[in-house]
Image: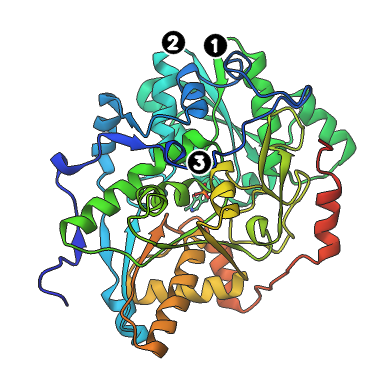
Amino acid sequence: MDKNIPYKIYLEEKELPTAWLNMRAVMKNKPAPLLNPGTHKEMTFDELRGVFCDELVKQELNNTDEFITIPQEILDFYKMYRPSPLVRAYFLEKKLGTPAKIYYKFEGNNTSGSHKLNSAIAQAYYAKKQGLKGVTTETGAGQWGTALSMACSYFGLDCKVYMVKCSYEQKPFRREVMRTYGASVTPSPSDTTDVGRQILSEHPGTTGSLGCAISEAVETAVKSEGYRYVLGSVLSQVLLHQSVIGLEAKAAMDKYGISPDIVVGCAGGGSNLGGLIAPFMTDKIRGIKDYQIIAVEPASCPSLTRGKYAYDFCDTGRVCPLAKMYTLGADFIPSANHAGGLRYHGMSSVLSQLFDDGLMEARSAVQTDVFKAAVTFARVEGILPAPESSHAIKVAIDEAMKCKETGEAKTILIGLTGTGYFDLKAYEAYNNGTMTDYIPTDADLQKGFDALPKM
Ligand SMILES: *Cc1c(COP(=O)(O)O)cnc(C)c1O
């Protein structure tokens, strides 16, 4: 082990970031604006504030301020579980026999088990400050719903969660965590909304999708006095809040004179990756250092690697604004055997633009390879990684093995977004050897593209 660099680097309280970093202020090509789904005109502050909290709409539309001060109440809450550790993966390096230096920023050290709490607490704070009664949201596997229910209980807000029906049934434990924090959890599609009733009548027996749960949560927010809708990924405001991950990682590395050559993270809607890369990407855009930045997605839900860069609906019910993003089409649902998370059909507009500008790479991985990497990591590093996070581990291992061939000692930074304790069904399938891979055919994907809105 390197005597000069601690095994785990923790920042001191006085070194923690006090402002979020907004990459959009530095981007030369700004992400395309949200459009009204009816008129195809740019969404205004007044239109958006019917759905989202005022302060969050301001953040969503803010392409100019590079730093946005983190309110003291949020900083105080962050202190409960931040800084998150930056860990040198000495044991993984040794196992791989690589000269690469691997670091991971671990976001699983809180009860929600993922990075999602970083944005949940911010969104709950602004809702409370606006005097709202509560918020509605959707959740797939349950990490976001869990994080939001923790944040709402902290600020005394009501929290209504629409949970994708198959997860509601398959992941009862995550549901109970949410209920423990006082949230009400409804399986989606449900008969509590117009859009839910319509989807149920058109597709009886459906096990639901994120896009459908979003539609239900939005409808409930718009129809309930004193409620707004909040979203745990994809939106630019969520990437903004997640920048604490990258800011802490960079500060911890700077403190010891370390600089990554490669920054790699998993990408579902893009929030953890957008947060992790924020300070590195702004340096890259400014020409300070040409970091290699890699997004990793499932081969079964390949929005960046095989999607189209187009305006699309964010939800199945088509009630949300249109966003320009790399997308597989709002009706796309990954194949039923897909167990590794990262199921959303589109990608953050910010990351989509950075990818389109060639500032970031994207790779896809099949789930059996992802779980193989997860098991390797778990056995040597002592953390049971979330399947989502394991996509990043898989590609980091690939890059470390390349270093072994070339003899280069590159420094690799991994975003390790969370733990996998609620994903043991997926681990079970992998351990039993029954996990399979399905890669959608071009014809499968074409169906999604055919349904893109005609602009
Ligand atoms: C939600 C989640 C992700 C993916 O979401 P992003 O918005 O792409 O970051 C990744 N890892 C974990 C553990 C998650 O809970």
Instruction: Give the percent coordinates (x, y) of residue 299.
Output: 66, 66
For mark 1, what is the residue?
Answer: 226
Q: Which mark is residue 144?
A: 3
Of 37 and 356, which appears nearest the observer?
Answer: 356
Q: Residues within 10 Å of mark 3 (few under 14, many from 20)?
A: many
- Residue 270 point in image, percent of width and height: 53, 48
Identify residue type, mark 2.
Gly
**Label 1 vs label 3: CA separation?**
21 Å
Toward which corner of the image does residue 32 lie, by quadrant?
Answer: top right
Q: Nearer the viewer, residue 163 or 250?
A: 250
- Classify the position of the C terminus by image quarter: top right
Residue 411 point in image, percent of width and height = 32, 71
Quadrant of the rendered structure where residue 45 is? top right
Residue 131 bears which disc, if any?
Answer: 2
Amino acid under disc 3: Trp
Marks 1 and 2, the one that precedes in the sequence: 2
**Residue at the location (39% across, 71% down)?**
378
- The amino acid type, in three-letter code, at marker 1 is Gly
Using residue 408 as the reference point, say whether residue 43 is left or right of it: right
Q: Secondary structure at mark 2?
A: loop
Residue at 67% x, 40% y is 324
Q: Find out whether the residues at labels 1 and 2 contact each other: C-beta distance under 8 Å.
A: yes
